[in-house]
Image (tube, grey):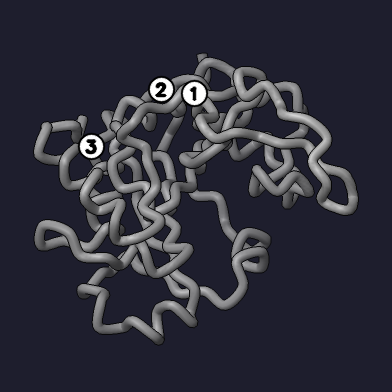
Amino acid sequence: MRRIKSAPSLYILIEDETALYPLKNKKIYEIALDQAKNSQFKPDVKILCPRNIYESNIHAFNTEPNLIIYDKFEDYLLDLKFESEILIFHNASRPLVPKRIYDQGIKMLMQGRDAVKQQHVVVDTLKRVDKDSFILETVDRDLAKAVTSPEFYWTESIIGLSRDFSWFYEIKDAANKDYIFGELESTRVRSKRDLFLVSALIEQGRLS
């Protein structure tokens, strides 16, 4: 069993303006922040925001000491100094990810995994197409999984930026990645219509 000497470093990523939608007197990113802090491991949480989104919506941000503004995400990842044995990234537009997802991902790293990510079953119809976008066949969606955040790393295993678009970092042993099956609460806010679902989940007490 691995041991950690410091709190996991968790970065809440504001990737688009959906994270700034207001809901129940808070912004979506603030709800995501509160959820992350519920983890039993009490991660050190910071918020990452692209400069263009920040400058276009500066009125939407409260005084937040842990807000970090960046120009290019890849450069930020390259320059990031690892302050903990565990590094986590999460999309702010998935505000209700249960604390069990954070707890389980961290525990899996402590038990020996080098990278962990949440995944969901696929509910959409999938098609395989050729280079001209003609449909060749319908893919069995039971054989596919949708990969989403949070994304967890044991920092000692990181060797550089990933060439796989579904991961931020490359690790020494790619076979030592694993996945956590997600839940309905992990839904992503893609438009203002999705706020009704998030609001309903909050009213049902689905915040643990």
Q: State which tag comes first along the sequence, 3 or 1.
A: 3
Q: Which amino acid does label 3 sit on?
A: Asn
Whole-number angstrom distance, CA of label 2 to CA of label 3: 13 Å
Q: Nearer the viewer, mark 2 or mark 1?
A: 1
**Picture residue at 27% right of the left edge, 65% below the top:** 21
Q: Which amino acid does label 1 sit on?
A: Ile
Q: State which tag comes first along the sequence, 2 or 1.
A: 2
Q: Is residue 8 in view?
A: yes
Q: Is mark 2 on a helix, strand or loop?
A: helix
**Tag of residue 180:** 1
Q: State which tag comes first along the sequence, 2 or 3.
A: 3
Q: Do callouts 3 and 1 mark residues in contact (Cβ within 8 Å)?
A: no
Tell me where residue 37 appears, x and y as whole percent: 26, 43
**Tag of residue 104:** 2
Quadrant containing the C terminus in the rendered view: top left
- Which residue is identified by label 3? 38
Whole-number angstrom distance, CA of label 3 to CA of label 1: 18 Å
Tell me where residue 127 appears, x and y as whole percent: 71, 36
Residue 100 or residue 8, whichever sits in front: 100
In the displayed structure image, the side of residue 29 where residue 53 appears, left or right: right
Report crowding for label 2: few under 14, some 14 to 19, many 20 or more residues within 10 A (C-alpha): some
Residue 7 or residue 126, whichever sits in front: 126
